[in-house]
Amino acid sequence: MKKKLLSLVIVLAMITALALPVLADNSYKAGSGNAIVYIKGKTTAAKAQDIVDHINQLRWNACKNGEPDPRDNGATNLDVNDYTEVSYAVWSETLQQLAQKRAAEITVNFSHNRPNGGTLDGLSTDTEAIAYSSTGLDLMDEGGAVDLWAEEREDWIAKSTTSKTNEYQLLINPDIKYVGMASLNPDGTKVRYSVAEFSKTEPAAAQAVSETEHTEPVEVPKRDIQSVALTPASVHLDVGGTTQLSMTAQVISETRYASVTQTCAMQPTSWVSSDTSAVSVDTTGTVKGLKNGKAKITATGDADLTATAEVYVGTSTAENDPFPVEHDVKTCASAAYTDVSKDASNWTHGFIDYVLEKKIMTGTSATTFEPGTNVSRAMVATILYAQAAKPAVTFQNTFSDVSSGAWYASPVVWAASKKLVSGYPDGTFKPNTDITRQDLALILYRYAEYSALDTSASGNLSRFSDASQVSGYAQTAVKWAVGHGLLSGFNDGTLRPTAATTRAQMAAIMTSYCEKVLK
């Protein structure tokens, strides 16, 4: 029979034992060359009674109809005397717990060949079936895993040599008396991973099954980890200010059907500050600004994987995404500007030097930069126009309030033609209106797309107390900006997406854009 696989694909293998070493404090330790990552998602434990009733009906029908006996690979046929009922009373919580852990594990290791070759949490099973659904079908959904496994019946009866029937054989095998099933929907995805565990004997007692959103530790080979990073990648702190860093890994799961990349949490084994007099970091990744200065924080995880973050400490309360720029304040690019701090440890100085040297931004006069002045919509268009090497532009009357003689005319017309900026319903551009942080993120995101750069980065906004203030139209762009460290938030835990952007902040953001997005 040609099965209707829909978007669900299923593989099965016979395994004897599945374990990840468990320490006394319930933490996990990776095998040599492997790493522990933490999968976050919502587990759906199978409805035990529904599963049992379904399997028992399949078993009874198989015995009543004299279908081939899976115990001898179909050499003989079943009869009603072979019928054994899977009782609801012996639904296995242990196998259900194992299925839950395996559902998490296969999100990054879609294989029966586990990285450490051992068992999972000391739990073992005789046989297992795993399923992947790109549309989120659950175990007992119509057309879900159990129904699709049962669709193998016709091929089994016909003794087809071209189709797999292992799943159906498990469902009707009289020797299989214990079953547990579960599914996992990882955060931020539409896919669902489902697992069924089968056993001839009752396994040992299991931990409690969690049906709420939670994390499961799983072990993956180092080769499957594409990259690791600290979040935030850079941050500015006041003296005495603190922030929390976290380590993540981009893990790729290569299956026969698809290549799926997932962002997973990691637990570093060590944290180190390059300058402990300026920035301290504890064993949990909490950093604290001790005095004006800067430091690189290095986190080391399993398999010697490392990630770094830049931390600047200063007296400014402004948001900052630092990129270290060494310079001599007497001869640097901003030396002529009287309103730019001459203190090299001030977070604004290096960034202003950078954008001046690269001719990304200019002063507002021969002696002023106006770092505290808000950036207007016209200024943003002009900055990107300069970044694009000021291509030739034929003026078009695109907006009613942008005249051909305006200093920003060519930049605005160019930016509009590339769909980087847009106007208002009344036909105006409002060039002198302050640019909000979320709108700046959107324009930079569009500029990255226009420049054919990778825009797949996506930061987690939940760490900001005002994340709900990010408008729907800017969600993807703001997540991208946070993911790249262009926006890293303020000391009070806010992102302030609707606040204006100062020229000093713009210098920091453009420095980071050039050094982190373009490279």
Image: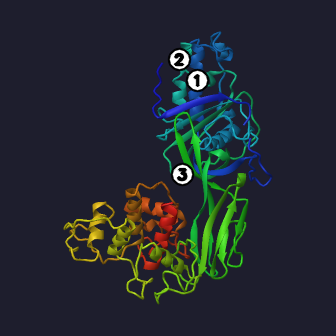
Please state if 178 lies on the left or on the right of 25 as rendered: left
Q: CA distance from mark 1 to mark 3?
A: 31 Å
Q: Which residue type carries mark 2? A: Asp
**Which residue bears the numbered disc 2?**
155
The quadrant in which residue 77 appears is top right
Image coordinates of residue 514 in percent, x first then y, are 48, 66
Q: Please name the residue shown 58% across and 42% down the image.
A: 253
Q: Please name the residue shown 61% across and 72% down the image.
A: 311
Residue 493's disc number: none
**Which residue bears the numbered disc 1?**
168
Q: Earlier in the sequence, mark 2 or mark 3?
A: 2
The quadrant in which residue 193 appears is top right
Image coordinates of residue 132 in percent, x first then y, are 54, 37
Secondary structure of the residue carrying numbered label 3: loop
**Is residue 283 or residue 398 the one in the foreground?**
398
Q: Which residue type carries mark 3? A: Asp
Camera sees residue 44: no
**Is residue 329 or residue 248 the one in the foreground?**
329
**Number of other residues with Cα within 10 Å of mark 3, as a class: few under 14, some 14 to 19, many 20 or more:** some
**Number of other residues with Cα within 10 Å of mark 1, as a class: few under 14, some 14 to 19, many 20 or more:** many
**Which residue bears the numbered disc 3?**
187
Q: Is residue 489 above or below residue 164?
A: below
